[in-house]
Image (tube, rainbow, N blue to C red):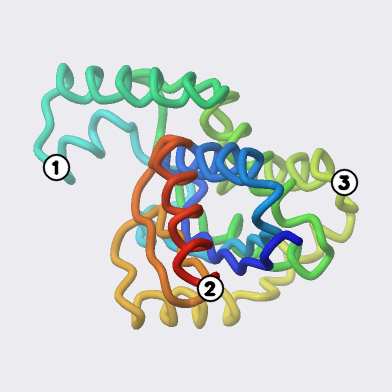
Amino acid sequence: MARPMKIDFVSDVSCPWCIIGLRGLEEALARTGDLIDARISFHPFELNPNMPPEGQNIVEHIAQKYGSTPEQSAANREMIRARAAEVGFTMATSNDSRIYNTFDAHRLLHWAEIEGKQAALKHALFEAYFTNGQAPSDHEVLIAAAEQAGLDGAAAREVLESGRYAEDVRRAEQLWQSRGIASVPAVIIDDRYLISGGQPPAAFEQALRNIVAETA
């Protein structure tokens, strides 16, 4: 009988390592399906909480934040693109890509969990931003992602325009920060074990198998 497992996935939809990590985790869970019955909940983390809705050019932003040259930024994007391709995800960022505010996306994800469609929306938002180059601060983009995930578009619009769940998202962000989460993705297993970063499937699989063995 498969062992129940609670997985909290703290991440941002504008974080490339978060989709790489999510794909790696999902592949690892597929490989361990006979051992583990996992329930994944997604929690908010904003990499750039002060970013205006219109965003900022990615090369400019990375230069300001990390001191990277345009050449270093391009090389890093290529490395990330290759890692994403290894887990079957198309990363189409370029010198013209932008970094956006993601707070409204997190509000919509909070609602999607209530509706039972959170994972589907998470994937739709990653695809919208990284593959299609769309702004996760744009309400029309968010509504389209919600509909792609099987959610009601009119209800999604009402959530976004009303400002609903803002306090819930703020509280959740503060909670995970108070627990020491300062970078993402952060994968917390059964409130006890932390797996950090966009690990490949094999690394996640080994960690999961070790946890099952330790707690057997």
Whether 108 is drawn above or below 26: the answer is below
What residue appears at the point 63 percent right and 42 percent down from the top-left corner? 125
Q: Which residue is mark 1?
A: 66
Residue 147 falls in which quadrant of the image? top right
Q: Residues within 10 Å of mark 3 (few under 14, many from 20)?
A: some
Q: CA distance from mark 3 to mark 2?
A: 29 Å
Of pointers 1 and 2, the one earlier in the residue sequence: 1
**Labels 1, 2: front one:** 2
The percent coordinates of residue 171 (x first, y second) are: 50, 82
Of pointers 3 and 2, the one earlier in the residue sequence: 3
Residue 163 in view (yes/no): yes
Q: CA distance from mark 1 to mark 2?
A: 34 Å
* Helix, strand or loop at mark 2: loop
* Helix, strand or loop at mark 3: loop
The percent coordinates of residue 53 (x first, y second) are: 48, 50
User: Mark 3 is on which residue type?
Assistant: Gly
Q: Are marks 3 and 2 in contact (CB under 8 Å)?
A: no
In the depicted view, which residue is nearer to us: 33 or 48? 33
What residue appears at the point 23 percent right and 33 percent down from the top-left corner? 60
In the image: residue 61, left or right of residue 92: left
User: Mark 1 is on which residue type?
Assistant: Tyr
Q: Which residue is mark 2?
A: 190
Residue 139 in view (yes/no): no
User: Mark 2 is on which residue type?
Assistant: Asp
**Labels 3, 2: front one:** 2
Task: Work out which quarter of the rendered image holds the N terminus and state it.
Answer: bottom right
Q: Residues within 10 Å of mark 1 (few under 14, many from 20)?
A: few
Residue 7 falls in which quadrant of the image? bottom right
In the depicted view, which residue is nearer to us: 192 or 75? 192
Q: Which residue is mark 3?
A: 150
